[in-house]
Amino acid sequence: MAAKKQLTLCLVHQHPKILLGMKKRGFGAGRYNGFGGKVEEGETVDEAAKRELKEESGISVDNLERAGILDFSWEGKDGILEVHIFKATEFKGVPEESEEMAPEWFDVSDIPFGTMWPDDKYWMPLFLAGKKFSGNFHFGEGDAIIEYNLNEINN
């Protein structure tokens, strides 16, 4: 079985607005996404999500809601990215551009799916509806989705 690397993804959702960031460098550059990254040794997934949100957008949160867990894999590459997705509804501070991300508010009816990871359009409706979910996405050439599985989790 391929090794899993834990990552976080945090989206600030204050209906009808959602805060996304344009990734300026590194993995996923040129795409809008939530805020997040690697879980460092010695920190919990929740701590990592809060730290990454603060580093990338300048805002801090006290409370995060767990929304989902998605596994991502790529054809011809070893390893799986296990991404823990969080929702924040309240925050402190003002979103500011960092070296890595440029935050921008969008109306939920105008989310820029064309400049996001192709999987986002599948799970984002569950996220926006306050549903919990899990699944996996397997990508091929050009980050095209080869296969996926997405399940709503009933609490």
Image: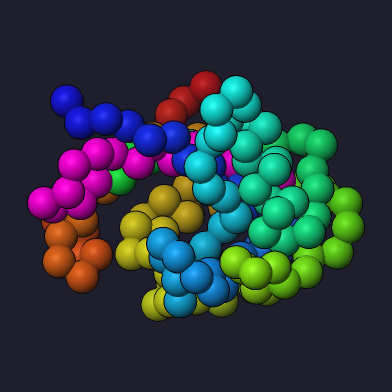
The answer, for residue 22, to whether it is visible in the render is: yes
Q: Image check: 127 left or right of 59?
A: left
Q: Image check: 30 left or right of 22?
A: left
Q: Residue furthest left?
A: 76
| Closer to the camera in the image, 125 or 40 | 40
**Residue 57 picture quarter:** bottom right
Q: Is residue 107 magenta?
A: no
- Tag count: 0
**Residue 134 picture quarter:** top left
Asked if 146 appears above or below 32 in the picture, the reply is: above
Q: Where is residue 29 in the image (x, y as percent from the top left)?
A: 45, 71
Q: Does the magenta stretch include residue 80?
A: yes
Residue shown at 67%/59% (left/top)? Answer: 56
Q: Which residue lies furthest to the right in this view?
A: 93
Q: Main secondary structure of the magenta part?
A: strand
Q: Tell me the magenta residue range.
A: 73-88
Q: Where is residue 13 in the image (x, y as percent from the top left)?
A: 68, 55
